[in-house]
Image (spheres, helix red, strand yellow):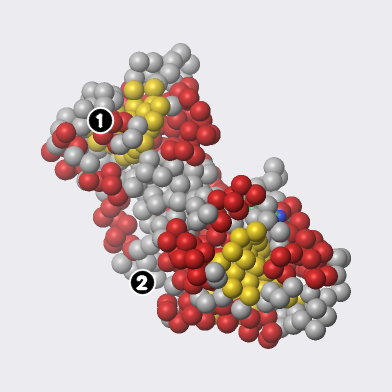
């Protein structure tokens, strides 16, 4: 198959590299000329485990190429995947400007296709609200009379394990109207579904679009749910670690997504929930569990800051109450194994601590450049967790990088053995035995 993948971000780049791995001829397209130049040289603009090797392999094999101009690949393409961003608009809805613009560009470029060509399968892979396939169809149809069909094929990959998720999917959802479109999509996904024994779901485009939002809403709801249980566990002297494994052992519930933390962030859940709420409002359908999920998350994002303020006796109205204090911040990415800092709790911590007059020395394994570019000199940066902790009044854990678990806590040059762990990386008893005052989520702190 010949495939165009438009947008070379987290989703587009992964899809392009994986479709090349599946044996297809892929042309990746992006408007960002500097990004395309880097990609052509084999330099990945994002951190994603396994991605560099895969996309360099197929640059070398010649099955993967990059361009800024989608016209280059349109004439003989079987499918064109739209993988551009759908950021949150001011009213909460998904901003479809980029998606619709690509629809119009594809429509204009269709003039280059021979009249005898099979219908081009145009695929919405970006996360888009119900009805977008029809809007993209209208954008394309306004420019061309050549044959095409717009298909919805939402993406479920997780940053940090995106390649694995794409090559071995649990399921592939395809919202399409014709057997031709289904056959093209099946040919592209068949090798991956065979490898994973994943499921194939054909449905109408609107149901496919809603499936993506419903999946993210369910996952976000579980996170907010366990965070509420964790906060209650702490208040009543229970241990959420026991509770979560015991409820997760019920096959109706399952163990995934039941880890307490500093609330969900990243590029998807926050904006997708807002978009789904907006869809609910537009159709006069109150989405009450969703509103509660968002509200719980807003509260949870401040959880470490609240604990820290309580510990240091910070009261409202005190001017710079933490002046002279220095905090080591371990982790900046919104989760481990990614460099994505969109809606990361660490950013709120940096801002909150700065307002309290404190100094922050941050460390991360992938996201330091992104944070430097965003916050400038609002915090300092260290090359290792040990260097960040040097002389610190407390260590704050914001991202669950597994390497932090392996740090020799006895050898840290901290001023005080005080830790606020937003990821429950350590066990309270073990930390207590090492002489640390250890605050975590949903477990009663053991403090002398
Ligand atoms: N990141 C994730 O984990 C993830 C997972 C599933 C779904 N999604 C969805 O996939 C979509 C893309 O997300 P992302 O994280 O890859 O975004 P991203 O911001 O990383 O990448 C988008 C890319 O599209 C490019 N672009 C914008 N307009 C263009 C145009 N007209 N032509 C060509 N390129 C253009 C941008 O330059 C950018 O490189 C979003 O709708 C997102 O919600 C993301």
Neighbor class of circle 2 (other Cα within 10 Å; few <14, some 14-19, many 20+) is few
Res 108 label? none
Q: Is residue 347 left or right of residue 40?
A: left
Q: Secondary structure at mark 2?
A: loop
* Residue at x-position 44% and y-position 32%: 349
* Residue at x-position 69% and y-position 84%: 180
Please state which of residues 375 and 204 is positioned toward the viewer in this rendering. 375
Please state which of residues 313 and 355 is positioned toward the viewer in this rendering. 355
- Cα–Cα span, label 1 and label 2: 38 Å
Q: Quadrant of residue 232?
A: top left
Residue 339's x, y, as percent? 45, 47
Q: Is residue 342 left or right of residue 247?
A: right
Count the marks: 2
Residue 372's x, y, as percent? 48, 33
Please state which of residues 441 and 404 is positioned toward the viewer in this rendering. 404
Q: Is residue 403 left or right of residue 349?
A: left
- Ligand 1, seen in the image, is in the quarter at bottom right
Q: Quarter holding the C terminus?
A: top left
Q: Is residue 308 visible?
A: no
Under 8 Å from ligand 1: the CB of mark 2? no
Residue 138's x, y, as percent? 82, 66
* Residue at x-position 61% and y-position 78%: 1
Q: Secondary structure at mark 1?
A: strand
Res 251 label? 2
Query: In this picture, is 348 found above or below 90?
Result: above
Between circles 1 and 2, the one closer to the viewer is 1
Q: Earlier in the sequence, mark 1 or mark 2?
A: 2
Query: In this picture, is 308 found above or below 202?
Result: above
Query: In this picture, is 352 found above or below 407?
Result: above
Under 8 Å from ligand 1: the CB of mark 1? no
Q: Is residue 438 visible?
A: yes
Res 418 label? 1
């Amino acid at each position: 198959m010949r495939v165009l993948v438009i947008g070379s971000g987290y989703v587009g780049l992964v899809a392009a590299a994986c479709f090349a791995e599946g044996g297809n001829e892929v042309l990746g397209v992006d408007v960002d000329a500097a990004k395309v130049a880097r990609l052509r040289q084999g330099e990945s603009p994002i951190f994603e485990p396994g991605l560099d090797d895969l996309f360099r392999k197929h640059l070398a094999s010649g099955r993967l190429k990059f361009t800024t101009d989608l016209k280059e690949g349109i004439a003989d393409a079987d499918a064109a995947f739209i993988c551009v961003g759908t950021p949150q608009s001011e009213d909460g809805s998904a901003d479809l400007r980029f998606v619709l613009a690509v629809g119009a560009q594809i429509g204009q470029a269709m003039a280059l296709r021979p009249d005898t060509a099979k219908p081009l399968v145009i695929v919405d892979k970006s996360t888009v609200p119900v009805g977008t396939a029809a809007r993209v169809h209208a954008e394309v149809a306004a420019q061309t009379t050549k044959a095409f069909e717009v298909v919805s094929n939402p993406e479920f990959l997780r940053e940090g394990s995106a390649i694995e998720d794409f090559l071995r999917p649990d399921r592939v959802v395809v919202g399409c109207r014709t057997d031709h479109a289904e056959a093209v999509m099946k040919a592209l996904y068949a090798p991956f579904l065979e490898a994973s024994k994943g499921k194939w779901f054909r449905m109408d485009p609107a149901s496919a679009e809603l499936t993506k939002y419903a999946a993210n809403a369910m996952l976000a709801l579980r996170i907010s749910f366990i965070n509420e249980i964790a906060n209650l566990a702490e208040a009543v002297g229970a241990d959420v670690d026991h509770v979560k494994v015991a409820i997760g052992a019920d096959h109706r519930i399952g163990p995934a997504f039941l880890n307490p933390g500093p609330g969900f962030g990243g590029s998807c859940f926050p904006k997708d929930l807002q978009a789904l709420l907006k869809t609910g409002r537009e159709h006069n359908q109150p989405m009450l569990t969703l509103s509660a999920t968002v509200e719980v998350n807003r509260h949870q994002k401040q959880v470490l800051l609240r604990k820290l303020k309580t510990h240091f006796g910070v009261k409202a109205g005190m001017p710079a109450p933490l002046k002279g204090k220095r905090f080591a911040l371990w982790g900046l990415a919104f989760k481990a194994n990614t460099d994505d800092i969109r809606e990361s709790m660490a950013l709120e911590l940096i801002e909150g601590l700065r307002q309290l007059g404190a100094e922050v020395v941050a460390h991360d394994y992938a996201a330091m450049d992104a944070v430097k570019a965003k916050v400038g000199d609002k915090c300092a940066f260290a090359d290792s967790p040990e260097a960040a902790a040097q002389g610190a009044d407390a260590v704050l854990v914001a991202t669950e990088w597994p390497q932090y678990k392996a740090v020799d806590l006895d050898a840290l040059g901290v001023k005080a053995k005080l830790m606020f762990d937003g990821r429950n990386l350590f066990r309270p008893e073990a930390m207590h035995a090492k002489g640390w005052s250890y605050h975590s989520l949903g477990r009663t702190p053991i403090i002398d």
